[in-house]
């Protein structure tokens, strides 16, 4: 517990507090938040206590900045705000008009809007029951999900029985049972998840059907799989997002973790999924790139400055320090993450690794949100970098933001430096577990889409490289010397 003297307020621009804007689809489910102007309803894009923005089709009126409009902001059919609003801005977003309004003479109670949505959801669930969800899910996916549910339930029951049978044997017996089961289950589980992915692929462009299929999956299948620690952590999202540093640590260890044989089996199977295996092999690719750049810097007699954006536990740095035949020399790492706990773990492990090998290297950490970095590339100050890599962030960024961040990072390179950006590749047949079972949404991209990250001016060298698990592609941009 801190004293009042130890509590910190804002700094710089953060001193002028503004309520955080929230995306309407995150605050109110199923696109139920709308704004009515002159009898015409528009879908809200985001909202804060003092204002909202909405998407206006091409045929909507051409409002001017400072126009005052009569508006009715609704959740489902219930009014949450009725009054006047001033047009504050209009901008183009992905070819669409987005209009921002500032409320006049009142405020938007976001908690009340959320309550209204939850009450409407409860009323709808009680009145319509699960049939509402069931009807939206295609028959092919219902059949594939039923197969997956039966598969998992079968092994939950079978492994539970045999685990109880050997309970008095040595402690290693549970691990032996899990290893024996994994060898037999692995190929069948692959068939189950490939079939589920194939069954839901036709609905990937149909958002209501996707939401219904995910709801059915999370109701029937996900609860059984929570015995697997990596699945439980990724699904519950205690830090607010699925791929936090503890999930990464589970994946890096790739071991039999869990309190039951069933949990151990499905934890290990989840850690073997291509996206998880790719976390380990993309780490190895980063180590390979680091060693190559280190050799270049040594030949030039210069230090090597490396920046890792979204560093997580910085496992690649820890392993490089430990595995190098000779203590590394002349590498200076800048580790950046938006999660304080991840940075703390990375800083501790990297410094311990440097000290253990008496390596002539250094590391420092920057606690920055990715939003800060995208909005203000100058938030990263200091000398230009020789190698910058980002392996777990671009999967969540829109193309426009990915391009903006790529340009900002490219500017941070010194002449001759290398920028490495990873993104989950498309098409693939392994998206089902993450998207439908874990509610872990990634933006999968093909090579043409990843190439579009590159700044329009274009570097002298651009290369696409696939890591060994074939789950992620890397865009490598070399700045002209």
Image (cartoon, rainbow, N blue to C red):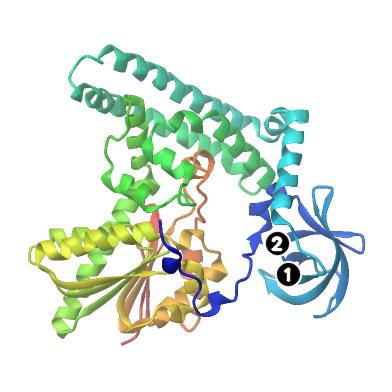
The answer to whether residue 468 shows anywhere in this view is no
The residue depicted at 70 percent of the width and 56 percent of the height is 110
Residue 280 higher or lower than 94, as above or below: above
The residue depicted at 50 percent of the width and 71 percent of the height is 9
Q: Nearer the viewer, residue 405 or 35?
A: 35
Q: Position of residue 448 (x, y in %)?
A: 49, 65
**As drawn, is 406 to the left or to the right of 129?**
left
Look at the numbered discs 2 and 1 and tell me whether their residues touch, using CB distance below 8 Å. yes
| Quadrant of the image occupied by residue 24 | bottom right
Whole-angstrom CA distance, mark 2 to mark 1, is: 8 Å
**As drawn, is 450 to the left or to the right of 341?**
right
For label 2, the residue is 45
Placement of the C terminus among the 4 image quadrants: bottom left
Residue 109 higher or lower than 231, as above or below: below
Q: Nearer the viewer, residue 382 or 179?
A: 382
Q: Position of residue 148 (x, y in %)?
A: 49, 28
In terms of sequence position, does the residue under pointer 2 or pointer 1 come before the other? Answer: 2
Q: Callout 2: 10 Å neighbours few (<14), some, many (20+)?
A: many
The residue depicted at 52 percent of the width and 50 percent of the height is 441
The residue depicted at 73 percent of the width and 51 percent of the height is 112
Residue 344 higher or lower than 204, as above or below: below
Q: Position of residue 383 (x, y in %)?
A: 32, 84
Residue 210 higher or lower than 349, as above or below: above
Q: Nearer the viewer, residue 465 or 243?
A: 243
For label 1, the residue is 98
């Amino acid at each position: 517990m801190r004293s009042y003297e130890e509590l910190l307020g804002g700094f710089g621009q953060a001193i002028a507090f503004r309520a955080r804007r929230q995306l309407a689809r995150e605050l109110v489910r199923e696109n139920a938040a709308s704004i009515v102007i002159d009898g015409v309803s528009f879908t809200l894009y985001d909202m804060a206590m003092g204002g909202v923005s909405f998407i206006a089709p091409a045929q909507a009126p051409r409002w001017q900045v400072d126009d005052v409009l009569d508006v009715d902001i609704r959740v489902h059919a219930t009014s949450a705000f009725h009054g006047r609003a001033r047009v504050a801005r209009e901008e183009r977003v992905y070819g669409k008009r987005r209009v921002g309004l500032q409320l006049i003479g009142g405020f938007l109670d976001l908690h009340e809007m959320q309550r209204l949505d939850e009450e409407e959801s409860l009323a709808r669930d009680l009145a319509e029951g699960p049939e509402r969800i069931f009807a939206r899910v295609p028959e092919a996916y219902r059949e594939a999900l039923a197969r997956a549910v039966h598969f998992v339930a079968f092994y939950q029951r079978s492994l539970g029985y045999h685990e109880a049978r050997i309970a008095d044997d040595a402690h290693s017996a549970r691990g032996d049972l899990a290893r024996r089961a994994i060898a037999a289950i692995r190929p069948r589980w692959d068939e189950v998840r490939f079939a589920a992915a194939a069954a839901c692929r036709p609905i990937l462009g149909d958002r209501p059907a996707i939401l219904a299929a995910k709801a059915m999956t999370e109701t029937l299948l996900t609860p059984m799989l929570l015995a697997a620690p990596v699945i439980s952590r990724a699904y519950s999202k205690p830090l607010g997002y699925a791929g936090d540093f503890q999930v990464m640590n589970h994946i890096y260890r790739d071991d039999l973790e869990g309190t039951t044989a069933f949990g151990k089996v499905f934890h290990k199977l989840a850690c073997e999924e291509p996206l998880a295996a790719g976390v380990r092999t993309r780490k190895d690719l980063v180590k390979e790139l680091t060693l190559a750049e280190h050799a270049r810097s040594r030949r030039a007699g210069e230090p090597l400055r490396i920046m890792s954006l979204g560093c997580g536990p910085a496992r690649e740095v820890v392993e490089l320090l430990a595995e190098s035949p000779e203590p590394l020399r002349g590498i200076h790492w800048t580790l950046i993450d938006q999660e304080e706990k991840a940075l703390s773990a990375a800083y501790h492990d990297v410094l311990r690794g440097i000290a253990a090998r008496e390596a002539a290297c250094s590391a420092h950490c920057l606690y920055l949100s990715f939003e800060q970095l995208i909005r203000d590339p100058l938030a990263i100050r200091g000398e230009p970098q020789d190698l910058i890599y980002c392996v777990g962030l671009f999967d969540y960024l829109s193309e426009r933001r990915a391009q903006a961040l790529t340009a900002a990072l490219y500017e941070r390179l010194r002449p001759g430096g290398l920028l490495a950006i990873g993104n989950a590749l498309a098409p693939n047949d392994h998206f089902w577990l993450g998207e439908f079972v874990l509610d872990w949404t990634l933006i999968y991209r093909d090579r043409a889409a990843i190439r579009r990250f590159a700044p329009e001016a274009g570097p002298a060298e651009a290369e696409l490289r696939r890591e060994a698990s074939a789950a992620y592609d890397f865009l490598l941009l070399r700045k002209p010397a």
